[in-house]
Image (tube, grey):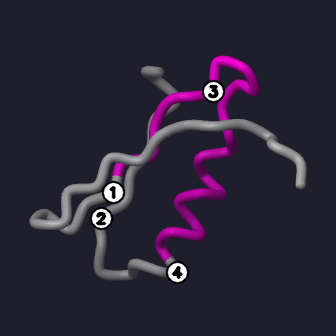
Amino acid sequence: LKCVGGGRIMHEPQKKSLFVYGYSQRYGPAKHEQTVNLLQKKYPEYKITYSYEGY
């Protein structure tokens, strides 16, 4: 398994919201677009957004 980047996910269940953001200090940012695509399949009722800003 190869680490290709990192980031964080903010989950607000009461708003049905996921926010993918940030990066890994060691590995840099993951491809958040791919993460969002995977999350949308699992959580189709959620609003899912992303940003490369922040740590």
Query: Residue 15 in the image: x percent, y percent?
Result: 13, 63
- The tag on residue 18 is 1
Q: Nearer the viewer, residue 48 or 55?
A: 55
Q: Nearer the viewer, mark 3 or mark 4?
A: 3
User: Which secondary structure, mark 1?
Assistant: strand
Q: Which mark is residue 47?
A: 2
Mark toward the viewer: 1 or 2: 1
First in residue order: circle 3 vs circle 2: 3
> Which region is colored magenta?
19-40
Q: Residues within 10 Å of mark 4 (few under 14, many from 20)?
A: few
State which tag comes first along the sequence, 4 or 2: 4
Disc 1: CA contacts within 10 A as few (<14), some (14-19) or many (>=20): many
| Disc 3: which residue | 24
Based on the picture, tell me whether residue 34 belongs to the magenta stretch: yes
Mark nearest the camera among 1 and 3 is: 3
Q: Are marks 1 and 2 in contact (CB under 8 Å)?
A: yes
Between discs 3 and 4, the one toward the N terminus: 3
Q: Amino acid at mark 1?
A: Leu
